[in-house]
Image (spheres, grey):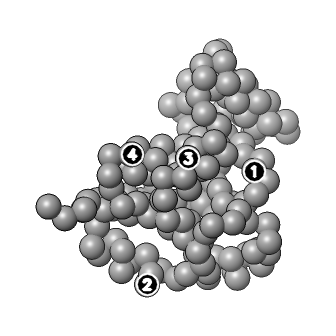
Amino acid sequence: MDDKKLAIIATKGSLDWAYPPFILASTAAALGYETQIFFTFYGLVLLKKKLNLQVTSLGNPAMPMPMPVPVFMQAMPGMQAMMSSMMKAKMKKKGVASVEELRDLCLEAEVKMVACEMTVQLFDFDKKDFIDDIEYAGATTFFQFAGESDISLYI
């Protein structure tokens, strides 16, 4: 039986969107899948050494809150930081691994992480700001892997 492969495209760089690619990739790797994540556009910030991720409560009515917060209040200065702080505290209390811990777990499990070279250039990112053990490549590199994958996910 051939090895199974999972290809993930990570396009979002907020706290709430950081978890799915790392959880799915680390789980797939633990199950024996050869796994690759292609980080592009805003998802590329998930590869930075220093993360300052915030939740995206505005426009996300499904986000469970301890008390209802009207949309107009979510747009007020400081609300995103406050909601992010609340979410991080809740995750810590519930024993949920941090994004950094999940990312490290993926690296230990040999999940291949690829930074989109075009996005690095587009946003004038400095490669020294990114973690080690990642590759830089274009979409064609991702498609080579995704074309052979059993599962491809867009997150």
Which residue matches tag 4? 30
Query: At 72% across and 46% down in the image, what residue appears?
Result: 53
Which residue matches tag 1? 51
Q: Are marks 2 and 1 in contact (CB under 8 Å)?
A: no
Q: Amino acid at mark 3?
A: Leu
Find residue 105 and name its label. Answer: 3
Q: Secondary structure at mark 2?
A: helix
Work out how far the residue at label 3 is from the one at label 4, CA to CA, in angstroms.
10 Å
Q: Are marks 1 and 3 in contact (CB under 8 Å)?
A: no
Query: At 64% across and 15% down in the image, what residue appears?
Result: 66
Q: Residue furthest left?
A: 1
Residue 149 x, y percent position in the rendering: 28, 67
Q: Amino acid at mark 4?
A: Ala
Examine the image and state in which quarter residue 54 appears. top right
Residue 140 appears left or right of 114: left
Which residue matches tag 2? 140
Q: Is residue 126 above or below residue 22?
A: below
